Amino acid sequence: MISLLQLLKESQSTPKAIILAGAPGAGKGYILKGLNLGNLKVYNLDNTYIDLLKQANVSLDLKTADAEARSKAAKAMAQATQKLKKEQIPSAILNKESFILDGTAASYKQTTQLKEELEEAGYEVMMLYVYTDLERALKQNQERFEKSEGEDRSLAPAVVLRSWIGITKNYQPYKELFNENFVSVANTLEGEKMSDIESIIKTYLDPFKPTDSKPKDAKAQARSDKQKEKMNADAQALLKDEAISNIINNSVSKEEAQSKLKSFIS
């Protein structure tokens, strides 16, 4: 069997970039390992983020972080994001290096800008979209720190919820943006899933709700309440929407994704 690395060596003139999209806990890393992508360089925001958290002596169990740890974690995420955007990706582009970007792709605008930048630099760009249920994403995130014996991070569940909403909303726009260079894989729970956002919040978010946040003034509190109300309404609409069935029904197996990725690389 010809490896993807061999195919890459035969196609040096046209560098390739594969952008991964999927909520935290979607199983992007699991899907990626199962795709046998050889020695392609993988840029993963999480790797830098985790290193910076460790340097700042912040526990990777961010779902239980106090106010000080949350502040440090926010700064670490900003640093990791800057390193990816300002150093790692520009360096790859400069060297015409084929690579995989393992992130959430929660921002359609930023992903579109990256795609355009890569194409202007002579790249062919593909998206591998990994869908998972909201409940599975939250469950995976909740158990991640403990299952890894403290080596991997668990995010605040509200962050997972916001990311899931953005990613799920972006499925159709991404499918249209990448056209034939788009493939999706569904990594979902078997059996019944909660479809009521209030029940999901009660089970996965409320147990880790921060209790040491600084009190907000009336205006800030009203703004925060409005944002949460909209987020919950968006999540509930998606949970009831047939769009999710469309995502799952139009997704392919890991093996089919492997075949499409090989074809893209070659």
Image: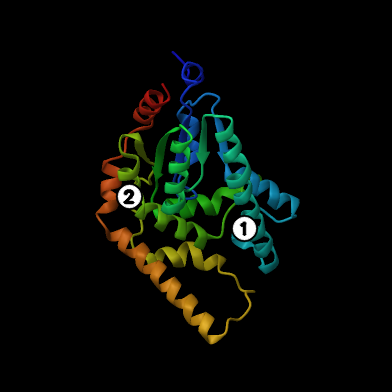
- Identify the amino acid type marked 2: Pro
Q: Secondary structure at mark 2?
A: helix
Q: Residue at position x 42%, y 63% from top?
A: 200
Vertical comparison of 243 with 202: above or below: above
Question: Residue 125, position in %: x, y?
Answer: 42, 35
Tell me, yes or no, if residue 135 can be seen here.
Answer: no
Q: Farthest residue toward the front?
A: 120
Residue type pointed to by label 1: Leu
Query: Which label belongs to residue 173?
Result: 2
Task: Work out whether residue 139 can be spotted.
Answer: yes
Label annotation for residue 88? none
Nearest to N terminus: mark 1 or mark 2: 1
- Relative side of 150 to 133, left or right: right
Residue drawn at point x = 44 percent, y = 71 percent: 228
Label 1: how many Cα within 10 Å (few below 14, some 14–19, many 20+): many
Q: Quadrant of the C terminus?
A: top left
Q: Are marks 1 and 2 in contact (CB under 8 Å)?
A: no
Residue 12 spot, x, y in % from top left: 50, 21
Quadrant that contains the N terminus: top left
Q: Is residue 7 above or below residue 131?
A: above
Q: Whole-percent x and y of residue 264?
A: 39, 27
Question: Residue 43 is drawn in which quadrant?
Answer: top right
Residue 87 or residue 234, whichever sits in front: 87
Residue at 66% of width from left, 68% of height from top? Answer: 67
SS state under label 1: helix
Residue depicted at x 28% and y 60%: 240
Residue under label 1:
62
